[in-house]
Image: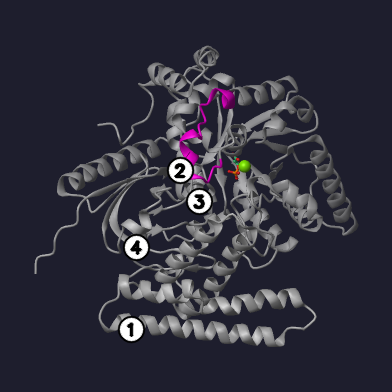
Amino acid sequence: MNRVKPREIILKGISGSPGICIGKAYIVDREGVNIIERYQVSGAMVSQETDRFKNAVAKAKKEHARIIKALDKDVSETLNILETHMALFKDKMLYGKTIETIQKEQINAEWALRKVSRQVKLMFQQVDDQYLKARANDIVQVSDKIMSYLLGARDIKIADINKRVIIVAHDLSPADASQIQLERIKGFVTDRGGKDSHTGIVAKSLKIPSVFGLARATTSINNDDILIVDGSSGIIIINPDEDTLFKYEERLARFEAYRADIERESHLPAVTRDGVVLDLMANIELVEEVVSAKDNGASGIGLFRTEFLYLDLERFPTEEELLVKYRELAELMTPQPVTIRTLDINGDKFNPYIDPVEEVNPSLGLRAVRFCLENKDIFITQIKAILRAAAFGNIKLLIPMISCMEELQQVKAVINQAVSDLEHENKIFNKDIDLGIMIEVPSAVLMADELAKEVDFFSIGTNDLIQYSLAIDRRNRRVAHLYQALNPSVLKMIKLTFAAARKNNIDVVMCGEMAGDPINIPVLLGFGIKNLSMNSASIPVIKKMIRSIDFKKAGKFSEKLLEFTTVQEITRFIYEEYKDILPYRETED
Ligand code: PEP
Ligand code: MG
């Protein structure tokens, strides 16, 4: 029987990390701790699948009944909630609809359950009634319970995928992305996610193409569909026709040749045409990334995001565990600097064991230094480990998300406490290390002159500075088009920060993703920035760019640039002036 060739479909999303890959789709989904596959079932399998679902519900109910029975009768509120959940297990909307979906759509039970629970949740959330809104959460919790029985031993881990595939997921957390086995996975695409999210940052460092915010990827793609992922332009093509495939195979070859070319030059110094030497450092999330940082020609670690060590464990790491990692990093890099940033948890890097409170607006919530100041024992443990590791290399201490002077004062008090604890404990440590703060909240920019008097360096975190200045959630695909590094207000913030640092004679590093995008480089050099830290994978391209720019000329250029009031004009002005040295873009042919 001739199979009808599926039609080519193009979906537009947001560029997660650059590059092109072509391969077969592998659909997974991440809900809670499990990854959910989608596959078709037919014939006798349909009733097997229905039975599997019914069995999972029965087991989940039994376990639930056991919990209720063991409950102390004094906790009547908890009892009420659990009894509500008991009724929901056999709720028509959840139970009946899931069975109907398995049978009608001939899909596996996990996928059907996920689909139905999302629909029910959405329905409840749209109702203008607080009680019913709260029911949405109950539905999710009950369906998660059933899901865990459904998945049972078949829980897939990203790290276990052993095919050369492109992952298609509803969403992937940064921790999931970091589990990707490079030799197996060619790229990944997701329904959710926005610009400069932490998942994108991990993908860039792995050098695998990714596209986020596609909205319909998991519903439009089937397992084994051929996919083209164009991470640079943020599009994917499902079941491409022959002409498209041919065109992209050529582009892929060109891109790889270009990458090899710039990587060959990555060990040359980052010096401008008129002899100004810059420091290009790497942002890393795991100690293992030091190899890639060095291979790409980094002159130090400008940002070590420490969250991942915490997210991987089921509990908080001890001082000794942290010390082992930090010391290893310091020794591997010495004499080059390593900037260790204290825990920046709860924005989009969230783990229920760390803070089980779900916030409505986590980016504006108890994130980063705010969380650490509320949990001083965790904070002090980390600072002690950093000070101890500083005895073995060139370590700097960086505090994220400072938004006012009081926070900085409190941080200093915690550091003093850590020093005095270490003295009492007779530990070897080094307290004479540089202290820096991230400038990533507009209030810190406006207070930069005062804050500069209290610290040794600033690190401009443009990922958040853009998010908070323009009020754009960096994970939200619907407003991703407004997330613009070259927005004149963002440029003014950077200029102000730099001026305050210069006035107070302290160093400035830029460590947001903005530093790794070639189009921004003439502007940043024009502002006088000499220290940039970025994803290791971006270093060779940025180095090449810097080596073609005249520092003095860039200064005059940026002054003129700030006369423009729109992103469009600013972008055009940069292209006009620097088009000959801007790197190859896959979309231009
Ligand atoms: C930033 O906000 O620019 C930054 C570097 O930190 P993160 O991306 O980890 O929030
Ligand atoms: Mg940040």
Which numbered disc, 2 or 4, marks the residue that appears first in the sequence? Answer: 4
Gap in Å between the C-alphas at discs 2 and 1? 49 Å
The reply, left or right, for residue 407 in relation to residue 81 is right
Identity of the amino acid at label 3? Thr
Numbered disc 3: secondary structure = helix
- Are the residues at dot 4 and dot 1 in contact (C-beta closer than 8 Å)? no
Q: Is mark 2 within 8 Å of ligand 1?
A: no
In terms of depth relative to the viewer, which is nearer, 295 or 353? 353
Which numbered disc, 3 or 1, marks the residue that appears first in the sequence? Answer: 1
Identity of the amino acid at label 4? Tyr
To which residue does mark 4 refer? 26
Which numbered disc, 3 or 2, marks the residue that appears first in the sequence? Answer: 3
Q: Does the residue labelled 4 lie within 8 Å of ligand 1?
A: no
Label placed on residue 47? 1
Gap in Å between the C-alphas at discs 3 and 2? 15 Å
Q: Residues within 10 Å of mark 3 (few under 14, many from 20)?
A: many
Span highlighted in magenta in the image: 473-491
Numbered disc 2: secondary structure = helix
To which residue does mark 2 refer? 537
Identity of the amino acid at label 1? Ser
The reply, left or right, for residue 18 in relation to residue 152 is left
Question: Ligand 2 shows up in which quadrant of the image?
Answer: top right
Vertical position of residue 72 compared to residue 222: above or below? below
In terms of depth relative to the viewer, which is nearer, 522 or 74? 74
